[in-house]
Image (cartoon, rainbow, N blue to C red):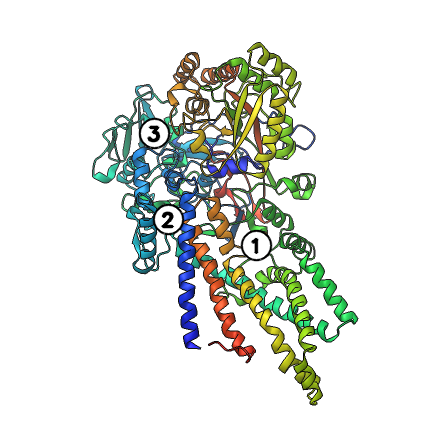
Amino acid sequence: MSFSRRNFLIATGVVAASTTVLSACSSSDKGGSGNGVPSVGDAKTVNIPVGTKADSAGPAPEVQGAVKGGTLYSLDQFDMDHLDPAQIYVSTEGAITVPIMRGLTGYKIDEKGGCTLVGDAATDAGTMKDGGKTWSFTIKDGIKWEDGSELSLDDVRHTYERLFASFVTEGPRYVQQWLVGGDKYKGPYSGKELDSIEISGRTITFRLTEPRTDFNYTLAMRGYSLVPKKHDTKEKYDKRPFSCGPYKIESRSIGKSMTYVRNEHWDPKTDAIRNAYPDKYVFQFGFQPIASTDRFIADRGNDQYAMTIFNEVAAERIAQVLTNAKLKQRVLTQVDTVTYYWPINTTRIKDVKVRQAINWAWPHQQLQTIRGGKATSELATTILSPVTPGYKKFDLYGLDKKPGGDPAKAKALLKEAGKIGQKLVIAYQQSDNAVKQAVQIKNALEAAGFQVVNKQIDKSTFYTQIGKIDNDYDLFAAGWSPDWPNGYSVFYPCWSGKNIGDGRSNYAQLNDPSVNKAIDAAAKIADVEAANKAWGDVDRQIMELAPVVPDYHSIRNWMHGSKVGNVVYDAGNTCIALCKLYAKK
Amino acid sequence: MLRFLVRRVIGALVILLIISAVTFWLFYAIPRDPAQMSCGKNCTPDMLAQVRHNLGIDHPVPVQYWYWVKGIFVGRSYGDFGNCNAPCLGYSFANREPVLGTIMDRLPTTLSLAFGSAIVFLILGVGAGMIAAVKQGKWQDKLASSASLLGSSLQIYFVGYIAMYFLVAKLDILDNPSYTPITEDPGAWASGLLLPWLVLAIIFTANYTRMSRSQLVEQLSEDYVRTARAKGLSSRNVFFRFAWRGAMGPIVTVFGIDLGTLIGGAIITEYTFSLQGVGRLAVDAVDKSDLPMVLGVTLLSAGAIVLFNIVVDAVYALIDPRIRLA
């Protein structure tokens, strides 16, 4: 999944936030490399299995020692840009809406820290036919909206049809691309239905243009959560969505605060995913990471009941927090599936040797220092993160031996290509850290024989600008993490020649026939193990062409107050699992 | 007096109109496309055209400005996004609500911060200045002068973080800075804002101490003060009836401007103490290129300064009978 303006702002700062990713479903990862610093390399790759019908039945497993009641608070920097599920493609927006939104499928975190794909509003994780071209889901009885009306199949159908409306511009596009007839459908508001969505009794069936054996994983994305037809206010829905989860929005002051109170019509027996221990959630926005970290450290008053969706431990406080045993107890550390990287515009830098030279010269270690050191990131040599299924370790450009870059090797390659003095225009977003990083990159590449021009781009238009196929940049910062746990949602969107175009996420505009072929072939493999192996091979195949410089895998640290119970990781949204928390008495 | 006020209000409206026109023009002159930013990453040319229409930026800039001004008096419709009732200062597509509503939501925080700190720094600053002037050359004067020199060289983000660290985190004397509406809980309102008030007061008090001291010293050496003393009036009478009133004119002028500026948004203070006021709103709006919101906040800031200038002019006459409004 690509990164929103906001996420990228954070990514280019010291802390990193990814969009929806799937990795290890676990509680706080207290493991590490032995020196107290968590390590991506030590993290385990976890495949998320598909659960049974019994797994999909509510209520959710009780959290040991949890008590009902109280209020939990958040201290965060930003409010959410979107609350309409169709517009949600950012992890923080996905995480904060878990208590109020439900999809057909979802991820269930069990008492052992395991994670399973289950039916959420559906009775199970779906039934596949025609090798994955047809999918059916039966919805549960007793799911009610916040006004007490029952969830209907009309609502479910409407949810998927409204994805085609013109105002939906930010959310994921998988389902829209796969549904038969989706290329011509304009949405339900003119009264037309999409024929490839069929309803019968309590069952909804989707007919797809291609076999998608992982379609049920796709539907677990927050972007496909349900919307009531009767209460769909179109553009305005983004401001105040309607709930069918255990909580509903009581009040919202955009940019300032949002409060959830209990949805009295929610029946825990219909929900295998959500516990609902606190009576209320009060999300407070406007706190810089350093301000929230200081308040967590002080742990006073209501802050004892506070956690964070977005803010990680500030870089200035990382050492203080992680080296203090008492404070460290209140930190959830999690390695992430996101890989931050620098795509190289292959339509401008066509010579593979030049691209390889950029990789050899890259100042990984210097950039890591600017980000806050090893506590917040680990250097990357691959597109897939080590916690993503399919990851295969390799190091084609000498990072292990020379993490600060090898200008001599890079210069030799450049000379071989006859491109000494090659001009590189590097685009980066405006932020303090990005400026510092740009200086390091310029120094390293110029030492290798490049001529570098750095260009700052306004962060609100950064992705629009680098997403244009005729842009004027050679290298730019980006990042990606899988939308569900396999290589498809990494390699198809970012590295398939079929996904080149204005606003698309193949920023490098790589269109290599052998890579395209390998991606298509891997996508058709039904066997999970074989598919994962194929995705690992695709990763290496792409890196041999060097259309990107993998920069780092992120390690995230969230702090919380001393009276917040059961702070565990929500792998589906790469944030704290809101629906597993409780307020200690 | 009435004639004076009417004249000043008309002048203020003209100033605001000019500021709004200049701000409007500036925003549309910069190389940013608000439609593209609102349209999202999956934007198509059709969608972009629709967003342009909804934003009302598919017209020439003068026409857009006319619609904006008209909206203040009669309201505006923003298509599928809804209506913005009069007085409509525009519609924020970033926040998906009318600009005025968001400003009114943030204004109480800023007003509380501004007026609360103003009371503190005015009393402390003028008080210390008076003592320094009366005790000219003595230790009290030296102390006040040194403290004001130190205070005026400090910055809010420095004092603010240090104060939070010691007074809140370490010593647990004050509450975390926060805003609670005064109507909801006056105690929580005051305790949540006490630290920002004090920190703002440290910075501003210094100026008022120095200014009131120098004004009073000057007034105390005036002929009319000497005459009053010679006529046998008590020192207290001479000080408060003559010297003090004469010294207050410039202080009131500066106070009016300071208060207007604070109401326009104490940006750094709000950031330092994580308060969600108008200043914070302005910075966020600039960050998101939320042009209608920036325009709204700019007008509020300008309006506050213009308003307090009028108030200051009126107060002048009350303080100093030598000044006639006509």
Q: Is residue B56 above or below residue A417?
A: below
Residue A333 visible in the shown view: no
Q: Is residue B174 above or below residue A561?
A: below
Residue under label 2, please give it: A240
Q: Which residue appears farthest toward the top when viewing the image? A: A416
Amino acid at the residue labelled 2 = Arg
Q: Residues within 10 Å of mark 2 (few under 14, many from 20)?
A: some
Residue under label 1, please give it: A302
Q: Residue at x 68, y 39 (%)?
A: A319
Q: Nearer the viewer, residue A533 or A113?
A: A533
CA gap, disc 3 and disc 2: 24 Å
CA gap, disc 2 and disc 1: 26 Å
Residue A256: which disc?
A: none
Where's residue A553, x and y in %? 56, 28
Residue under label 3, please give it: A175
Q: Nearer the viewer, residue A379 or B203?
A: B203
- Label 2 close to label 1 by CB (< 8 Å): no
